[in-house]
Image (cartoon, helix red, strand yellow):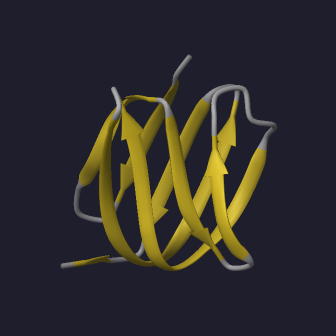
């Protein structure tokens, strides 16, 4: 089972696709979101976003942001992506 994920910055869309899971650096620890997760809003701190898609893991280092998930749609707004 999968859910729809969008990862956005002010300048670009980093990802927009169906995924299996996403791990985000919440201000109170790492949070993993899976399909059918309860509605949630998460404040993000600096750290790694890890996305699992078709068994492959893709990562981005970020400098804060916010994450919202509801009805199998997850949107992550990122302040900055750290190269």
Residue at the (56%, 16%) spot, across then down: 1
Residue 16 position within the rendered picture, expressed as x and y whole percent measured from the top left: 33, 36
Q: Residue furthest right?
A: 38
**Viewer-proximal residue among 48 and 82:** 48
Residue 37 position within the rendered picture, expressed as x and y whole percent measured from the top left: 74, 35
Quadrant in which the C terminus is drawn: bottom left
> Eyeballing the image, is 5 above or below 58?
above
Residue at the (63%, 36%) spot, across then down: 34
Q: Quadrant of residue 55?
A: top left
Residue at the (51%, 47%) spot, across then down: 22
Residue at the (52%, 39%) spot, across then down: 21
**Viewer-proximal residue among 7 and 2:** 2
Q: Quadrant of residue 15?
A: top left
Q: Quadrant of residue 45?
A: bottom right
Q: Residue furthest top?
A: 1
What count of labels does the image hold?
A: 0
Is residue 3 toward the left or the right of residue 51 in the image? Answer: right
Residue 17 position within the rendered picture, expressed as x and y whole percent measured from the top left: 35, 29
Residue 28 position within the rendered picture, expressed as x and y whole percent measured from the top left: 74, 78
């Amino acid at each position: 089972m999968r859910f729809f994920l969008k990862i956005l910055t002010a300048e670009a869309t980093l990802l927009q696709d169906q995924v299996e899971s996403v791990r985000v650096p919440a201000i109170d620890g790492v949070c993993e979101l899976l399909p059918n997760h309860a509605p949630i809003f998460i404040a993000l701190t600096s750290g790694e976003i890890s996305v699992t898609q078709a068994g492959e893991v893709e990562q981005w280092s970020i400098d804060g942001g916010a994450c919202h998930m509801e009805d199998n749609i997850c949107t992550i707004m990122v302040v900055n992506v750290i190269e």
